[in-house]
Image (cartoon, grey):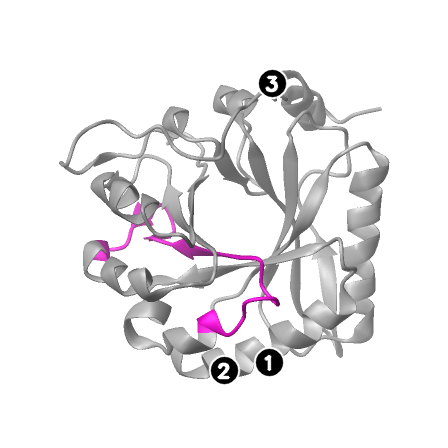
Amino acid sequence: MLSGLAMWLWGWMAADASSPSAVAPATEKPIRVDAANYRQFWLWGAVKPQPVLRQAQRLYLLQGHISQQGDAVRLQPQGLPPSPLKVPELWLSYRVATLDWQPGVVRDLLRQRTAWQAKGNRVIGIQIDFDAATPKLADYADFLRGLRRQLPADCQLGITGLLDWGANGDVATLNALAGVVDELVVQTYRGRTTVDHYEQYLPALKRLTLPFKLGLVQDGVWNPEWQRQFAAQPSYRGEVVFLLNSR
């Protein structure tokens, strides 16, 4: 039997969403991010589902936290248990506190993926949410290459990223992950709010050839002109909105 949360999601999510791209208002002035204008969403563990999810084309669903627990690094399951969801594309997202993984971590990730597939969901891939320090991007890239080798060929690998990576990091290191990482979602927010002076960081992303998206926070300050500028960039794949509970 589905949990109450799963029943809610199942009822609201429609499988006829047409495109992962945003329908942004025609304005060059900063506005608040209206989730109704988007088709890709993050749903974190403590966030209640919203009616906007029925238009979701792609859902990034929190599934666990990977951290040091006692004498080992383990996956602590979080979020919705495997359930049938009417969303065309599902990604399983994992918050990561350390890269010192034991072999059992990848095994557990893949078990969760199989469980979601068994419920009839189209699981596109696994997303790693790790805030790598900008000077250590090369070390993170090595970790991702090792992880890619352990995943099935039909399981995509995605990562979140920080604005600082493009502005103060080595973009060539990110671009070299082509064939390893299928997409990078650059988060323009911290917590519940948009990063201060976020527009100063965005021009650096025009050097990205790795497929990337912009991560926006619901109700955060945002200038949609950036969406129109990046739309002409071959590597740009749209926006993902991090949903929040109402205050």
Q: Residue at x 64, y 75 (%)?
A: 145
Give the CA separation, mark 1 to mark 3.
Answer: 40 Å
The mark that comes first in sequence, 2 or 3, is 3
Q: Amino acid at mark 1?
A: Asp
Left or right placement of residue 196 versus residue 181 in this view: left
User: Is the C-beta separation of discs 1 and 3 under 8 Å?
Assistant: no
Residue at disc 3, secondary structure: helix
Distance between mark 1 and mark 2 Cα atoms: 6 Å
The front one of 170 and 128 is 170
CB atoms of marks 2 and 3 within 8 Å: no
Name the disc covering residue 12, or none: 3
**In the image, residue 147 lies in the stretch drawn in magenta:** no
Q: State the extent of the magenta-drawn residues as a range.
A: 174-198
Res. 190 in view: no
The extreme left residue here reads: 29
Q: Which residue is mark 2?
A: 138
| Magenta-span inclusion, residue 180 | yes
Q: Which residue is mark 1?
A: 142
